[in-house]
Image (cartoon, rainbow, N blue to C red):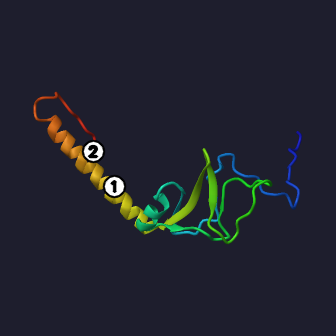
Amino acid sequence: MQKEAIVKSPSGRIKRMDARSGPLTVRGKEPGFIYRVVNDVDDRVESFREAGYEVVSDKDVAVGVKRVDRASSEGSVKRVSVGAGIQGVLMRQREDFYKEDQADKEARIRELERATKKEALDGNYGNLKTTWE
């Protein structure tokens, strides 16, 4: 009976990135916040600020995959190229505010669905069945 060899990674080896990591992956997130990359076009960044988001400039937070040819921007606004010449700005919002906003969105969707269902059941459109009520 042969013993299986245990393979250990060499000490000092850089930790490999998860295969699911991509250019918009955020590392070093502070707990209690929801992070997102906002395209820096028109007034989107300012609109997100008005909605309760803040621009992330924390030097401990990194966006994207580590690359040698990409300059570091420690201490400044975290930006990432999102394609077509557009830059994205890393922003975050408190998790409780985010959950409140999501609940408001869900309530609006439910109201629209109720209105649609009411119109659909006026006898002119046939049958409508939903699983949420």
Mark 2 vs mark 1: in front = 1
CA separation in Å, label 2 and label 1? 16 Å
Left or right of 98: which side holds 2?
Answer: right
Q: Position of residue 35 (x, y in %)?
A: 54, 61
Amino acid at the residue labelled 2: Trp
Left or right of 8: which side holds 104?
Answer: left
Indicate the quadrant containing the C terminus: top left, top right, bottom left or bottom right.
Answer: top left
70 lies above or below 4: below
- Can residue 29 be seen at all in this image of the molecule? yes
Amino acid at the residue labelled 1: Lys
**Which residue, given by chain and number where applicable, does mark 2 sit on?**
132
> Crowding near pointer 2: few (<14 within 10 Å), some, many (20+)?
few
Residue 26 is labelled as: none
Which circle's residue, 2 or 1, is located before the other in the chain? 1
In this orientation, which residue lies closer to the viewer: 21 or 91? 91
Left or right of 99: which side holds 118?
Answer: left
Residue at 65% x, 66% y is 61
> Crowding near pointer 1: few (<14 within 10 Å), some, many (20+)?
few
Indicate the quadrant containing the N terminus: top left, top right, bottom left or bottom right.
Answer: top right
In this orientation, which residue lies closer to the viewer: 54 or 115? 54
Q: Position of residue 17 (x, y in %)?
A: 72, 52
Q: Position of residue 84 (x, y in %)?
A: 60, 44
Residue extending farthest front? 42
Residue at 70% x, 69% y is 74
- Can residue 25 be seen at all in this image of the molecule? no
**Which residue, given by chain and number where applicable, does mark 1 sit on?**
105
Left or right of 129: which side holds 51?
Answer: right
In this orientation, which residue lies closer to the viewer: 78 or 25? 78
Q: Position of residue 15 (x, y in %)?
A: 78, 56
Q: Secondary structure at mark 1?
A: helix
Circle 2/circle 1 CB separation < 8 Å: no
